[in-house]
Image (cartoon, rainbow, N blue to C red):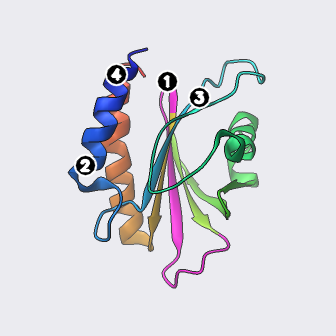
Amino acid sequence: MDSAFVDRAWDKWVSTGNVGSSGNPLKAAILINYDPAGPSRLVSTIAEQEGIDLYPVDLKQFIDFMRRGNLPTETFVLGSNQYIITSVHENWFAARCLNTIQPAGEGAIVMQTAAYVLVALYDGSIGSASQAVAAADQFASQLSRKNF
């Protein structure tokens, strides 16, 4: 796996106004090494993150959730927020935060590639979700072209 390519692609994607400050489609994003066919003892690691500070131990519940594959029937936790799935698609799903304090709400777009899971977090509702999907898909597509 070419981690240098992933690092460069991530830095370019983040720096072109996709993640971070107000007005960007995403408030935070995290890229997780993930092998769904690997043994459960194989620990997923954080490859990249921006706008959020998580440790691998913080991802255990989320990775277990992904491995179980019961997307529409369960919730997952990232950081201090709990999310419920609102729509499931071929290689991604959308979720809304259950315990948000934001008036317009918060959400997550989770996209899976061959070797990674990209979690894109956003503030807002439908329009914000559409922008978040487009921003996340832009990066996931780069990974998929390299079969990552």
Examine the rendering and report whether any part of residue 71 can be seen: yes
Quadrant location of residue 1? top left
Which residue is the site of mark 2? 15
Neighbourhood count class around disc 2 (C-alpha, 10 Å): few under 14, some 14–19, many 20 upward: few
Q: CA distance from mark 2 to mark 4?
A: 16 Å
Point out the tag, 1 or 3, that comes first from the N-terminus.
3
Q: Please say if the residues under marks 1 and 3 sit with CB atoms less than 8 Å apart.
A: no
- The three-letter amino acid code for the residue at tag 1 is Ala
- The three-letter amino acid code for the residue at tag 3 is Tyr
Please name the residue shown 65% across and 61% down the image: 83
Q: CA distance from mark 2 to mark 1?
A: 24 Å
Label number found at residue 4:
4
Which residue is the site of mark 1? 114
Going by the picture, which residue comes out furthest to the left? Answer: 16
Q: CA distance from mark 3 to mark 2?
A: 24 Å
Looking at this view, is 87 or 128 the one in front?
Answer: 128
